[in-house]
Structures are given as C-alpha cells and as structure tokens.
Image: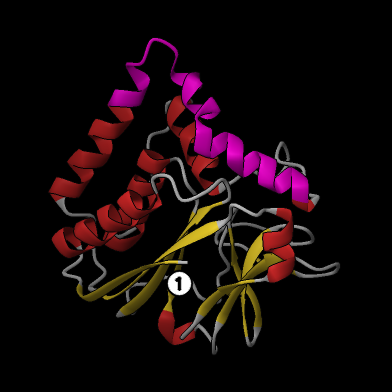
Amino acid sequence: MVVTIDPALRAKCPRVALGCVTAEVRTGETPGGLGEAMDARVAEILKLPEPRAVLESAPIVATRAGYKVLGKDPARYRGSAEALLRRVISGKGLPRINAVVDVINLVSVESRLPIGLYDRAQVRGDVVFRAGLPGESYKGIGKYDLNLECLPLFADDAGPHGSATSDSERTMVTGATTQILAIVVALGGVDGLERASQRLAALLMEYAAAHNVETKII
C-alpha cells in the first residue's frame, strides 16, 4: 500500500505533510492506563487559565487555513482535532471506543492534528490524499452522509474513505480489525509531525499490543 499526496492539493497547500503509521494490533476495551492518560490530558486542558486558547494553537489554525484554501468552510466542517478539543472544553471529555481508536484520539488532542484511522483489510489498493470532488460523499462514522466536495480526504481504488474531518464506516476500525493504517494530517508543515507519529506508535505498542509497527513521513 502506497500513500501519496495529490499534486493539485499540494499546489494549494504547499506545506502539507502526512505521518503514516502501520501496525498489527489487538483491539479491545480501553485499558486502565490509557483511560487515565486520557483523563489526565482532559484535566490539563480544563485547568488552563483560558481553555479555549487551545483552539487557536498553530496546528488548528493551519488546518482551518487549509480548508479555506481548498474551498471548505472551516466553521461548518471542522478538523477532527478541533472537534475533539471542543468536546473536551465543553466538559464532555474524550469518548471511550476501543484501545486503538482511543490512542488515536489522545494523540490528536495532544498534537492538535487530525488523524485518520483505517482497517487495512478494508482499504482497496493505494491511497491518495486529495480534495473532494463535486458530488462525492460517504457515510461518516456515527454521522449522516458527509459532503466531501473540497474537503481534504483519503481515497483508495473504491473511492473516498476518510478525511481530516470524519472517517467513513467502510474502513472503520472494529473489534475484528488486526491491521491498521493511521495517518496524521499536517496542512501547515512538518513541525510536530514526527513527534506525533512516534507517540502514536509507542502508545499502540503499550496499549494495543502493536507489533510490526512502521512510521513514515510523506
């Protein structure tokens, strides 16, 4: 499986970079240590003098700017990291899904970067990161059909399956997943991307029994 960035998207977002992590994992309930780490990160944000200031961090601002350049309104379609941070600030905490998904959400909140997560067995062929085309849509995880036009998204041979806003049900990670592809999206450049990718790999090994872990910056 090869992951590439579409030249047309790169022309509009010249600093775009991706951090790819592949691994064999064991999904399951959220381990106690991971739950504690998630709670600690939430508490850390809520204890800030101005918790909403995290919404103006450089990666969040860069994601919004990327959406605007591509033609998507970032006030209506938020990057997944911003959506998680807004959930935290509102007092709802981080959801508990399974060990793998929870690791992704934790690193996304820490890095302020959107992260796509995919069951490799459900991905068809190679993956390209591009802007959505007119008429494209898919059913987002736990959501209605998502209008993908102009949205920065991931597409395989079967079409779009993930985005910086919400991934699709087609390639979502479930209890049956054994191999994953996680992609950290940095529309504003590589700063913090290697750190986020390595943090992701380490937490997957610690809490999801990950092995054959590989990371790559694109």
Residue that extends furthest to the right in the rendered view of this protein: 134
Q: Is residue 184 above or below residue 57?
A: below
Residue that extends furthest to the top in the rendered view of this protein: 49
Residue 152 seen in the current view: yes
- At x 74%, y 66%, the residue is 8
Q: Which residues are magenta?
A: 44-69
Who is closer to the viewer here, 26 or 151?
Answer: 151
Residue 52 drawn in magenta: yes
- At x 52%, y 33%, the residue is 58
Residue 54 lies, in percent from the top left, at: 47, 26
Who is closer to the viewer here, 206 or 13?
Answer: 13
Answer with the quarter of the image where residue 191 lies. top left
Q: Is residue 163 above or below residue 65?
A: below
Residue 128 lies, in percent from the top left, at: 60, 75
For disc 1, the neighbor class at 10 Å (few under 14, some 14 to 19, many from 20) is: many
Residue 102 seen in the current view: no
Answer with the quarter of the image where residue 149 lies. bottom right
Q: On the rendered structure, is 13 left or right of 204?
A: right
Q: Which residue is mark 1?
A: 118
- For numbered disc 1, what is the local secondary structure? strand
Residue 26 lies, in percent from the top left, at: 22, 73
- At x 39%, y 42%, the residue is 111
Who is closer to the viewer here, 56 or 50?
Answer: 56
Q: On the rendered structure, is 171 left or right of 111?
A: right
Residue 193 drawn in magenta: no
- What type is the residue that disc 1 sits on? Tyr
